[in-house]
Each structure stands twice: as C-alpha cells, then as structure tokens.
Amino acid sequence: MKNPIAERITDFLKHYPPFSSLEYSKLLEIAKTCRVLYLEKNQTLFKINDPTHAFFYVVASGAIGLSVTSDTDDVLIDKCDEGDILGLRPFFAKNNYLMTAKAREESIVYAIPIETFKPYVAENPAVLSFLLESFASNTRNPYDKNNKGKLISENVIYNDQNAEIQYYQPIKYTRNPITATPVDIVKFVAQTMASSKIGSIIIHEDRKPIGIVTDKDLRSKIATGLYSIDVTIDKIMSSPVITVADNLSIAEAQIMMLKHNVSHLCVTKDGTNDSEITGIITEHDIVVAQANNPGVLLKQSKRAQKSADLKEVREKLVDLIQHSLDKNVPINHITSIVGEINLAITKRAIELAIKKMDTLPPAQFAWINIGSQGRKEQLLLTDQDNAIVFEDVEEEKYDAVKNYFIDLAEKVTRTLNKIGYEYCPNQMMASNPLWCKSVSDWQHQFKGWINAPAEKGVLNNTIFFDYDFVYGNEDLVDTISTTIVEETDKNELFFAYLGADALKNPPPLGFFRQFLVENDGEHKDTFDLKGRALMPLIDAARILSLSKGIKNISNTISRYSKLAELEPQNATIYESCADAFAELLKFRTEEGLKNETDGRYLNLTELSKLDKVKLKNDFQPINDIQEVIKNKFQLTYFT
Amino acid sequence: MDLNWFKKIVKDYPKFWETYLSYFDENQSKEQRFVVFDCETTGLDYKKDRILSIGAVAIQNNQIIVGDFMEIFLQQDIFNPETVTLHGILKEGKEEKIVEAEAVIRFLDFIKDATLVGHHVDFDIEMINQALDRLNVGTLKNQVMDTDVMYQKLKNLSEEEKTSLDDLCEIYKIKKSDRHTASGDAFITALVFLKLKKKLAI
C-alpha cells in the first residue's frame, strides 16, 4: 500500500544530510516507521538524565534548543532548526541524555526509530561519519572554545545563575560603527582605529558592507611587510563580512561566530550584505554580555566616553562582587579586583574631566584616593574621599593653578557622584580648597599633623595616611610619603596619640561574651561592624605600619602581611588580624548586598549560630593587636 | 434483558461487524488510539454522493504513527466529473480500487475502537454510516472528535463560527502541500489535532 504521508516525510528528509546520501526507496522505508510529534513552545522533548529514547529526532519545522542544566537553570548550547538532527546519543552511548531538548518555538519533529536506522548507518560510512560529527558538534560548549568538539560530559561545569537569562537576551553591540571606504589608505584607517581605540573597522561601499579589517589583518598583512602602509585598505580587508539582522540573541551571535569562524559580525538593516550597515558585534560584546568579567570591566572603563558608560561599569561591579562572593573567591582577591576597577573608573573620570577643561593642566599633579578608597577596602556604596597634590609653582601663579585644579576636581567629583560614588559628607575631596594644594603645602600639612597632633587635629584626619595614587605624576606622592616616614620616625608623641585613638574601641564583646550592640538611635540593637570591628583593625594596621616606616601600602590586609614579614615574632597575631579583617569585610559586604546598604550595621538576630561564632572568633585578634599596641607605644600612661 | 437483545443482534450480523463490535466489548486498558481520517467524496450530498477515497492515520501517545496508516480508493458507480479537478481522482484512475463494501470493512478493521478525528467530521462519519447502511449493519460506534469544534472551544467561538482546514493550517503554520487528497488532509488534520489537543490540554 502506498503511504503518501511517508512519501511526504521522505521528500522532506531527502534534502538534509545524512538522509540525502540514502536511496529514495530506503528512505521511504525509514519514513514509514517514523513518528510525527508536535511540541509546543517550551515543551520538553527529552530532559537531561532521562533514559535515552528509542528514537532520534529531525526538526521538521520550528526550532529545538539544546541546553545543559546548572542547578535549576538551563544554559542553551545549541539550536536545531529545520532539517537538523538531535538526540543522537542512543546511537553512541547507552547512558542517559546529557542535554535537555526543548522547543524554542512551536515545532514539528520527526522521530526516527534507532533500530530501523541502525542498519543504514552500518552500511553507509557517510551517514555514520555525519552522525558522529553532529553528535560531537551538538555537544560543543560555546563557553569554552578550547573544549570545542569534546563530549559534553567532559566539559560541562556551569554555575552561572543568570546565564540562561543573559544568554537569551538580545546582544548589546556598537551601533553606527566607524567605517572606511575601500579607497582609504591603510595608514589613515589604522590611525582612525588607534585614536578610536577599536580593533576592527568595516569597509563599506554606499553604506553596504563589503569587507572588514581587524587588528589581525594589520598585523599579518602590514606589519609583516606583505603590503606597504600606503596601499588602499581594500587590499588587506577580509571579505565578505558575515552579516546579521538586528535583535540577535547572545547565543545566536555566538553560534554565528562559531559557525563562520569569525570574531566580528556586521549588523545590517535587513541582515544581508546588500543593505545598510547599522552596527558591529564583536567577540568582546559577547564576553561583556556573558559575564561581568573584571578584565572586561577594566577595558570598558578605559574606553568609556561619558559618565553613563562608567556608571554601567560601576553597576556591573556590584554583580561581580556578588558573583565572586557566591563563588567563594577570597575577599582579599575581591577587594583588589574591585579596587583596580574603582581605580580605572576614577582614572577615566579624570581623563574625561581634563578633556572638558579649556586648557591642559598648568602644572604636574597627582590625584590620590584616601580613606577606604585609598585602602581599596570599601566594596559597596563607596564614598569618594580624594585629594590633589600639584607641583610647586611660582607664588604669583599659585592661585591660578590651584583654582584650575579645584575646577577640575569639581568636574571629577561631580562625574564620580553621577557614577554612584557619594560625595564625602566631611568634604574630604579634592574639590575642597583645603585638600587641593601643592607638594610643599601637603608636606607642611603632614608635618603639622605628625608633630603637633593635638592642635592640628590629626585624629580626624587619619584617613589621609591611607592614600593611594590614582592619576598623574606619582613622584609627587612619593615625595609626601618620604616626608611622612621622616617625620614619624621615632616620634613618640605622634604614636602615643594615634595609639590611644586606636584603642578607643575595645573588642566588642561584653563581660558574658555577649555582643555589644548599639543602645540607641536608628541602629538600636544592631552590631556596628565598621565602628567596633573593622575600624580597630584598620587603625591598628595604620599605626603599626607607620611606625615601621612602611611606604605606599595602604590596604589593611597588605599592611598586616608586610608587618608579619618585618616582625616575625608577632607574625601570628598579624596574620590572624588579616584573616579576621577579611572575614569581617565579607560579613559587611554580604550584609550590604542583601540590604542594599553599606553593610555597616549587622542585625544579630538574622545571623545564624555559625556566623555568630565566626564573628566572635574574629574579635580575639582585635584584643591581641590592641595589646601589641599598648606595649609597643607604652600607652599605659595614656589609658 | 438488554444484554440478550444485544447478543441476538450480534448473532444476526456478518462476521466483520461482529468483530468490529467486539473491539468495544473488552475492558481495555491499553493506550488510547486516535484515528484521524478524511474522505474524498463525489459531492456534499451524503444521500446521493459516494466516497472516492479514505485516508487515515493513527495517533498514539501524542505521536502520529506514520506506519499505522491506510489509504483506499473506491470503485465508482456514481461519478461526478465536476469534482475531479478538485481531488484528482478519475473514475478509472491508476490507483487500485476496491468496491465500497470492501473499503468499509477495511476501514472498520483499521479504526477498531479508536477515537475518530476529522475536520468537520460529521460529514465523513455520515458518509461512512450511509455506506454501512447499504451493508445492512449499524452505524459507527466510535467516539468522535472534530478539530473545528476543538478550535471553537479553544477560542470560545460559537457553533456557527466555522473555520476551514485551510484557515487552521494558516493559523498554525502547517504546510498544505498535499491538500485535497484524503491521506494528505488526514495528515494535516492530524497535525492540527496534535496542536489543539496540546493547547486544550486533553
């Protein structure tokens, strides 16, 4: 009996490999044994860990997504369209499916029994090799190019909670990219690329893409001497460009790049080569979209053109912190990464502000961060604390120079504020005339604090001893550091003052080893993590490293490490202080992320018993370090 | 009393009909089987017109079982040349033809106790029932589902608002390459049925 339905399926299959290499009559026999399935959008065909089916599948219409699962989330790794085959696992392995196949849109799928197909595979090597290849490529892992082609079971490790959501989102890319015409000279195109800090440029004719030149082309065709620098760009461009339409998802963009083995996609109006260029998608865009990778954030801050770009980086930084904490990255690594990115953001904000000034800076200067920013310890909701040092200038120019830098600082602090760094409530910012001055003035300032601590109010200004060079001429900062070391050396009075201050907050455990909580105000019955636990450790690290003449280290953990190196007899105490500090900072950061605050006040009732024990254990080093300070600086006279 | 009456009737009928009825006898627990079918006819008057061909395919477990399929062409006594252009079945076409009685018997043997599915299926059922009547047996006992009625239910349409199979294909993006052959329509209807079944969560 004729079977027109089977014929209809045969007519479909014969267009697609591996079926195309089979005779029509054989294919018809296969078609007669198959089944037709309808899948609604998001309906699952098979799930990860399901026992394998007696069928493999061919997409007749629609699209099936292949994904792997991490925790509860699916991570799409491939998409099967009309004519694509999937579910080949039972051919090659007896164990369960390693992927989930789910309809991404309404789909009709032909299910072909493995048993009927096997004989054809055995007698037809072309079919076998095609199935093997598909099996391997269906299991590729786009996250990890090095493992491309390996079986999924060997390389699937995903923890990214947001991966799926991110992956399905439309990719963000550069709109209206910089382009060149084929007759442009290589040298000038390269200059444009360099000044715009871009790694690729699309070559167009009548706004339609005809080629692309990337850094690689310049490297392999110009730098090698293959072409001279004054040829027209069309000589070295790669052509054609892979074009895509707007609204590509991250996954699709990545699959396109893998498919064509390119690192750039050109977005055009209708997605073809024959329409107007509207944007460019680079591999970099995919990386940016997938992860808040610190390297990418750094690069992004360097390329930022306006405060909004920097704000974006700053916002992603919060995700990065959360992510790193979730992954148990040691807190000192997190602080140094976050510190670097904060630094890069500030640097770029300064560069942008200088561009906005009418003239270039009239003198050498250095921008420094002070306080928690200088220590690179504040992870969340950082206040901006900063200052400017400029080189000594002739007296008649002094005011003009100072005014220039105050102006500049105002622009920078305003930008930083827009980005999300709050103004310092105590006006400890470079825009404050008090904290924007020449090297000599700063030296004088520090001498005053160090030699007459009482009168000059050093206790309110200890944060100036925690500074970090950000931008400009670092020598200026070194000069000040040297002055500080010279002035503090064996300066008993200064250390006595500072020491007494460092002891003003005793370890936060009461007589019955209960937590000392706040007694009044908004934060009643919470624990002041910053004031009672972090500050004592910060203050102790500062005074001890000043007394040791340690220069250019402001970070508390780094200070303790350095101290441990210099004073082996107290190394254990210093190391335990560093550990305690790291843990306390983690407490604070997690609390801050949870409540979108700066995490200063911990609600003890919300802490688990284990956390309370951990917290208490971190207080012992505070006690120990305060003993060290007492003995070292003979503070018994003062207290 | 009822039971005796039923037995008596069974005894009086031909073997094929007995067998057909017996499928409904058993207390079956096996998987539900649907048969999607379509009849091409000489016209739309079930009294005067005759079946030209029947195409049918089974659905089990939400899968169209391509191998569980039948297609038959009937020898014609009544022939309406006007409909030939529509369905392409000539009176003496090259397909193997069987007489109506054999066609109906084969059809019953194929459908067994399956739930019958069709688009505007009442007409097709009536055509079969008329043929059964000419064999002096009863009417179809199978449960019946109509894809248009399902669509009405899904969209809350009234009974009067009919939707053609063509329109449903349009709506559900089903390629209509083999429209107007019985088996082509049966397959398309089967696809429509799978979609509606899913959407109605039947």
Image (spheres, coloured by chain):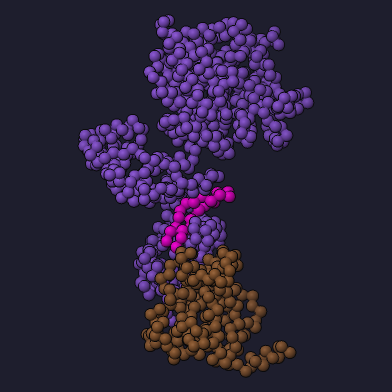
Q: Chain coloured purple: which letter? A: A
| Image quarter hosting the C terminus of chain A | top right
> Residue sitting at 51 percent across and 29 percent down?
A419
User: In this rendering, is residue A509 above or below A65?
Assistant: above
* Prevailing secondary structure class for the magenta stretch in the rendered image: strand
Region rendered in magenta:
A61-82
Q: Whole-percent x and y of residue B108?
A: 54, 84
Q: Nearer the viewer, residue A572 or A287?
A: A287
Q: Chain coloured brown: which letter? A: B
Q: Quadrant of residue B175?
A: bottom left
- Give the total of numbered labels: 0
Q: Nearer the viewer, residue A199 or A155?
A: A199
Q: Nearer the viewer, residue A630 or A255?
A: A255
> Residue sitting at 70 percent across and 32 percent down?
A603
User: In this rendering, is residue B32 above or below A394?
Assistant: below
User: In this rendering, is residue A118 above or below A606?
Assistant: below
> Residue sitting at 43 percent across and 15 percent down?
A404
